[in-house]
Each structure stands twice: as structure tokens, then as C-alpha cells.
Amino acid sequence: MPIDLFPLLAPLALILGAAGPGRRARWAEVAALVAVAIAALTVLKLGFQGGWRAETFGIALRVDVVSATMLLLVAFIGWVVIRYAGTYLRGEPRQGPFMAGLCLTLAAVLALVLADHLALFVAAWIATSLCLHRLLLFYPGRPAAQRAARKKFLTARVGDAALIAASVLLVLAYDTARIGEIAAAARDGVGGPLAVGAAALLAVAAMLKSAQFPTHGWLTEVMEAPTPVSALLHAGVINAGGFLLIRFADVLLLSPGAMAALVIVGGFTALFGGLVMLTQPAVKTSLAWSTVAQMGFMTLECGLGLFPLALLHIVAHSLYKAHAFLSAGGAVEAVAANRRPGPVAIPDGRAVARAFLLALGLYVLAGAAFGLAHKSPQALALGAILIFGVAYMLAQGLADAAPRALTRRTVVFALATSVAYFALQSAALWLTRDVLPPAPTPGALEWTLIALAVFSFGVVAVVQAMFPLWAYHPAAAGLRVHLSNGLYANALFDRALKAWGDPTTAPSAQKRTQ
């Protein structure tokens, strides 16, 4: 079977550390390309014969739509990042160990997405974090890199403890460590209080892994690491929390409290990250806050029970964010080289109102074509939230000073977005129909959270649409400063870190950096 070859990738990654200077990048790229080929063959085989389980070298692996999608995604992004790193670090004395670290991290992530045994899943989860920690400290003499890596290390270890405890409870509840068997039993409602406790711990582990508020600070401070590390982290490793929620979706549905916590924390993180992103002057910092917001939105999707859409979100965000980080420098130069073609269209309140009404109308029109009556309330609410995000761009096209060409393009874009949402949603539901559970019927608590989420995101979308009008107003100056500092949540984390003994503030660390 194609996936039987994956355990061989980790030893190959170790060999890269001892490769000659002229062969390091080339061999790393070969290893990544082999991973892409194996992933493609695995997906092809899945299309012909359906999912299967395999055991190689005593390692239990599982291939279904979820693992195959993640397998191909991780392998492809890893190949792109490794190719970029080969040029980025050309001439670097420690290029070999860096390439080995990249390959080991990717091997750990590949093991994570294929694991069908709790022991392998936990081991790969921890290995991914430890390998990434080494990459974050590629420049160990930089205090900011040390601080970010240490915060990541601390939050990751708490998440590891939560995952280990959840695994123990799952074994006790289901008398098996096979993830597939656990999911099948949980779908039948089996598990009891032990499974409910495991679901809560899984939610905690996922939120810590995906940098949810208030433990998000490390993700916005890892820019001291080389750009390939940032791309791999923001486009790949950070999605592990979402994958955990998707893989154990049936268990999570046994705990309405855990699902509600995911909606609350994820929704707030998405709103918080989106607002802070608008105030960041640096491109990569803004992209980092964008990742915080996107991970919050993905957590919100899982909390609403929209696991197929969360998987789709992971794929879309990973591809976009990898490209964004690797091309950030060129994009800045391209923007600086272009002159503004004329006056900027600034929407007023009437333009914003027209934009939101038009966007909702187009959304309903597209939804009616796909059958609104057959969609879950959670999916409809999520679509409304997405169309709010489109409406703030549509408002610029409806501004008084906007050229007609811009108006036509934004209207077409809004309609295309609505159609794409329903089409991709239908495709994701169909592909994962035998693997992931459908969205549950919402109760009173779920309806309250759905209404609160739609209202909150609608308000933020209006604020974004009118951003040019209020952003530089003197009354908004203080709010802008507070938002640009992330409401000081990360500063509180730093203060606590110093209280625990931050090595970057110790006299020995200060001497090393002088």
C-alpha cells in the first residue's frame, strides 16, 4: 500500500542532517516530492476502493477522506516550503540541520493525520511540537525568538497533558485505543461521562494548539524564525488543533458544553484577531493576526458541528497562507511600485447599508438555487457570516466615488462567493458523508450562540466597511492603540512568563545577546 512507505521518511530526514553542503536542499526536496507522490497515489487509491486501515512496522494507519485530504495538503505544502527554503538558506552553515528539522516536522504531521491508534496520535502530536520548537529557535541568540518559543513550549505542554488525559479517558470509556472504533461507538451514543470528560479535554487541547484567545500571543511573535518556518507553521502545523476536533467529531458531539465552549472561544478569537489585524503596520504581523482570526473561525465551525466545512476551511486557509507568507516580500515591492490610479472610494453609511442588503439578497438567491430548506441552521448562519465579510468590500464598489467597473466587479464577486460557498459546502458534505457526522439539531443554547455569532460578526463587518471613516478620527485613536497592542492580553502573558523565570531576561541571556 502507498502509505506503508511513510515511516521511511523520518529516517531519510535524519540522513539529511549529515548530507554534504551541496546536497542538503536537493535531498530534502526529493524527500518532499516522494511524499507528494505517495500522497497522490493514496488519494487515487481511495477514489477507487474507498477507505482502509493498514498496519506497517506495528504502526496502525487509517486512510479515509479526512486523512487523505490532509495527507495530500501537508505533503504539497511541505514540498513548496522545502523548495523555498533551499534558496532562502543557500550558503547558511546550518542549512543541513534546518532541512532535517523541516523534514522531521513534516514526517510528524504526516504520522498525525494518518494515525489510527491513540498512542501514535499522541506521539505524533508531541513530536510535531518539539520539532517545531527547534525550528523556532534557529536563531537562538535573539531574545524575541526565545520568548516566543518558550510561550509556545509552555502552552503546548499543557495541551499535551490535556490530550494524554483525554486519551486515557477514551480508552477507559470504549475499551479500545483504535480511533476508528472509538468514533463508530461514539456515533451510536456510547461513552457516558468518561467520553464527555474526554470531549472537554480534547477541546482544551485543540484550542491551545490553535492559538485561541488568550493563549494566542506566541503565534504573533514567531517572526524571528526564518520565513519557511513561518509558512510551515501558519499554513500547516497550526491546523493540528482543527484536525483533532474533526478526527474526534463524534466524541465532541456527546458534550454540548464542549461544543458551546468552542463556539464562544472560537467566535471571540475570530472577532478579536480580525480587528487587531486591521491595525498592524507590518505585513507579516498582519498575516499572523489573520491566522489567529482564521483559527478562531475554524474553531467556531467545529463548535457549530460543521466539521466538513472546517476541513474545507483548513485546505483553503493553508494554501492561501503559505502563498501569502512566501510571497509577502514581493507583494510589498509590487504595491510600492504601483501608483494609485485616482481618488479612493470611501463608502458612507448609505453605501454600507446598500452593500449589506445587496449581499444578503445575493446570498439568499444563491442559497435558493441549492435548496435552502435542506441546509442546517448552522450552515446558513455561517454563510451569512461569510457574506458579511464580502459586504464590507462590496460597500467600496457602491460608494459615490467608485467607478462603475469596480461596482460591477464587486457585485459579481459577491454573487460568486455565495455560489461558491453553497457549492463547496455541498461537495464537502457529500465527500465526508460516511466519515464525519452531520450538524446536530440546535437546541436553545445553540440557537442563542448562533444568533449572538451572526449579530457580532455583522457589527464587526459594518465597522470594517466604515474603517476609512472612523479609523483616523481623534476619538478612535485610543481604541486603535489598544487594538494594535492586542488589548494587552499578550503583555499579561509576558508578565506571567517573567514571574516564572523568563530565560531571555536572565543576566546570562543578556550577555549572550550583547
Image (tube, grey):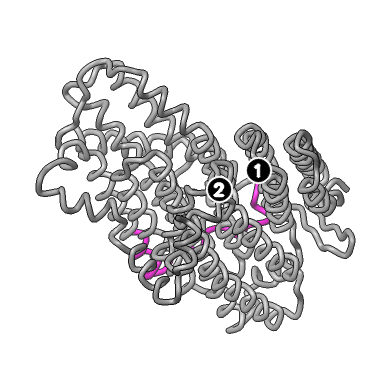
In contact (CB < 8 Å): disc 1 and disc 2: yes
Magenta highlight on residue 181: no
Secondary structure found at label 1:
helix
Q: Label 1 amino acid?
A: Leu
Front-most of 236 and 16? 16
Tell me the residue at 19%/29% (across/down): 346
In the rendered image, residue 73, in percent from the top left (x then y), is placed at 65, 43
Lateral position of residue 410 relative to residue 473, left or right:
right
Q: Label 2 amino acid?
A: Ile
Tell me the residue at 56%/38% (across/down): 319
Query: Nearer the N terminus, badge 1 or badge 2?
Result: 1
Front-most of 216 and 440? 216
Lateral position of residue 146 relative to residue 464, left or right:
right
| Residue under pointer 2 | 314
Magenta highlight on residue 448: yes
| Residue under pointer 1 | 73
Q: Which mark is residue 181?
A: none
Q: Is residue 244 visible?
A: yes
> Main structural element of the magenta stretch: helix, strand or loop?
loop
Lateral position of residue 50 relative to residue 126, left or right:
right
Secondary structure found at label 2:
helix
Q: Is residue 57 above or below residue 104?
A: below
Tell me the residue at 54%/73% (across/down): 158
In the rendered image, residue 273, in percent from the top left (x then y), is placed at 36, 52
In the rendered image, residue 27, in percent from the top left (x then y), is placed at 79, 38
Residue segment shown in magenta: 431-450
Quarter-wise, where is residue 60 in the image?
Answer: bottom right
